[in-house]
Amino acid sequence: MKQQAWATKQLTLKLELKNTPSKIALRYMSREHCPIRPKIQWLCETRDKDTLWWRVSTTEIVDLGRVVRSWHSRRARKAFEEELKARGFDSKGRQLPSGAQGLATAEQFHGNMKGTVSLQLRRLCLQGNLTTMRQEVKTLVEKLVKFQLENQQNQSQDSEILNRKSKSGGLFPTRKKMEASSGRAQRGRYEQELAIL
């Protein structure tokens, strides 16, 4: 599963398991003669892939003024960062040191949260208050952390299975095994032919 999405009344959270640049960065990188293209490409190439890339999107409320959009996106961004911190992660999804508070969830993790998250504001966020938005962000972050943990456990199980198979002779038969088994089959047919004579 490459993408996952969860929605509440005010917000939609979309998760992609691989790190992808934002649409704005892709727009600049697609233009050949853009003066900031090399800088944007360099930033995307050198950005830490072992962290959670996330952004707040205001595409559903783009018809509103810039001040209103930035105010609502700032509220959502702050609530998202607080919820990550409450679960033992910093704002980039990296685990906080073991002495920090809120490590109930982070202790189950091995490493950092990964992927790209887009937190999209919906039109109903205009009517809601800050406490409602924080509750909805809390619900979405719980689902995100649970999904990331399940994905991490599935990957570790898959790697264990591959390790076991490689130690027991691999997923596919080697050339020596194929030759040995075909040699036994040929010897068996030869012995059967001799028995008939």
Image (spheres, helix red, strand yellow):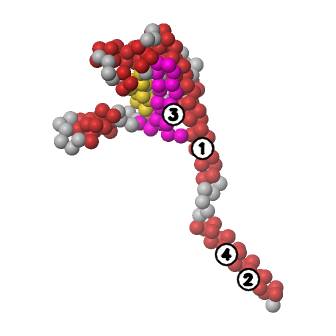
Whether residue 52 is in magenta: the answer is no
Residue 114 appears at what percent x and percent y? 46, 32
Give whichever of discs 2 and 1 has the lower sequence position: 1
Task: Give the CA separation, mark 2 to mark 1.
Answer: 43 Å
Q: Which of marks 2 and 1 is in front?
A: 1
Residue occupying the point 46% across, 35% down = 16
Task: Give the CA separation, mark 3 to mark 1.
Answer: 20 Å
Task: Give the CA separation, mark 2 to mark 4.
Answer: 10 Å
Q: Quadrant of the C terminus?
A: bottom right
**Residue at numbered disc 3:** 4
Numbered badge on residue 183? 4
Identify the secondary structure beneath mark 1.
Answer: helix
Residue 32 picture quarter: top left
Image side of residue 188 versus residue 9, left or right: right
Q: Which of marks 3 and 1 is in front?
A: 3
Numbered badge on residue 58? none
Give whichever of discs 4 and 3 has the lower sequence position: 3
Q: Which amino acid does label 2 sit on?
A: Tyr
On the question of residue 112 being in view, the answer is no
Whether residue 166 is situated above or below residue 37 in the rendered picture:
below
Start and end of the magenta stretch? 1-19
Task: Give the CA separation, mark 1 to mark 4.
Answer: 34 Å
Q: Which amino acid does label 3 sit on?
A: Gln
Identify the secondary structure beneath mark 2.
Answer: helix
Image side of residue 133 versus residue 193, left or right: left
Residue 106 appears at what percent x and percent y? 54, 23
Residue 66 picture quarter: top left
**Residue at numbered disc 1:** 158
Give whichever of discs 3 and 1 has the lower sequence position: 3
Q: Rate crowding at label 4 as few (under 14), some (14 to 19) or many (20 or more) other CA atoms within 10 Å.
A: few
